[in-house]
Image (spheres, helix red, strand yellow):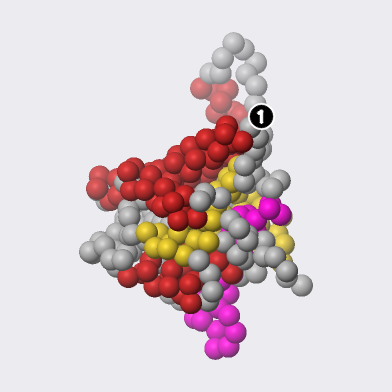
Amino acid sequence: MSLPLEGLSAVVTGAGRGLGRAEALELARLGAAVVVNDFGQPGRDGSGEASAGPAEEVAAEIREAGGRAVAHTGDVADFQQAAELVELAVTEFGKLDILVNNAGILRDRMVFSMTEGEWDAVIRVHLKGHFNTTRFAAAHWRERSKASGGPVYGRIVNTSSEAFLAGSAGQPNYAAAKGGVVGLTTSTALALAKYGVTANAICPRARTRMTEDVFAGLDRPAEGLDPLAPEHVAPLVGYLAAPAAAHVNGQLLVVHGGMVAIIERPRVRARFDSKQDTFTHDELDALLTPHYAQRPTGETFAAAEVLTLRRG
């Protein structure tokens, strides 16, 4: 019996620990050959000396289980190193079929205290890192499509966050980067569809080094799998990378603990038209102030509706 990803190759960034590790192992379990990328810095803020250890360990774990894997320890936020990452997949496995962007760091601070460096560092790793790998993977698929005269197999799974959907007071840099990832994803989905490539984004909720503070008050269960374990997220990534998801494109999905939620694109909640050539201040006051006064204090922009799929 063939596996869903048999004969395909994948790159997973930030795959030395946490979510990326679980995703790399899942893709390998489904039959993909995997390039395990991780810069290997010990600090979740991107601090400390880079190390080959995390990426090498996960690649070795895949090989020990009978899969194919190589490690890449470059910085995906560096344009040239991202190009080398994609080229490594092509050199080792003949082509690239799947790109999972997961690498990220945190430098949390309230917006009125955040430094320029803290802003730039998070935007660089999350948003520029997603762009860099996407750019070179997209070029690879476009070239292959032109050479074959038809569509090719290509899958991109990007990592956004609910911090973008609902806001996160102490993470203006992270929330902005994750919102940018969604925009990059939908733009990429439109641009690459004609080549046979899909691009989707997930908002995972999992207990990892990045979220240890967020879930500090939620204890792990004494028995069974932790509802916040990264292993709950990995199967969705495997599905989006597989042939079965050929018609899933430009989508945003929230996933955690046996739950998948499909996020709708924003919809118009209300519309107001001026009775003259343009609005006056008094007219806008009369129309908008009562509308927002009816909403709960502090309510912010969020997704319109979700379809929740739970295990029975």
The spot of residue 13 in percent (x, y) is 43, 57
Apparent side of residue 231 relative to residue 59 in the rendered image (left or right)? right
Q: Residues within 10 Å of mark 1 (few under 14, many from 20)?
A: few
Furthest-bottom residue in view?
222
The three-letter amino acid code for the residue at tag 1 is Arg
- On the image, numbered disc 1 is attached to which residue? 271
- Position of the N terminus by quadrant: bottom right
Q: Magenta span covers which residues?
A: 218-245
For image coordinates 51% across by 81% down, the residue present is: 220
Q: Is residue 85 above or below residue 32?
A: above
The number of discs equals: 1
Please state which of residues 295 and 103 is positioned toward the viewer in this rendering: 103
| Apparent side of residue 18 relative to residue 226 in the rendered image (left or right) | left
Label 1 secondary element: loop
Query: What residue is drawn where x is 58% and y is 56%?
Result: 8
Q: Is residue 306 visible?
A: no
Percent from the top left, x then y, of residue 59?
43, 68
Give residue 91's position: percent from left, percent from top: 44, 51
- Quick check: is 240 in the magenta stretch? yes
Q: Going 49% across and 61% down the picture, which residue do you hit?
A: 34
Q: Is residue 274 above or below residue 30?
A: above
Q: Whole-percent x and y of residue 245? A: 68, 52
> Is residue 33 visible to the viewer in this orientation of the structure?
yes
- Going 33% across and 59% down the picture, which residue do you hit? 73
In terms of depth relative to the viewer, which is nearer, 252 or 77? 77
Q: Nearer the viewer, residue 62 or 43?
A: 62
Asked if residue 74 lies in the magenta stretch, the reply is no
Foreground: 306 or 245? 245
On the image, which quarter does residue 239 sit in? bottom right
Question: In this rendering, is residue 216 above or below 269?
Answer: below
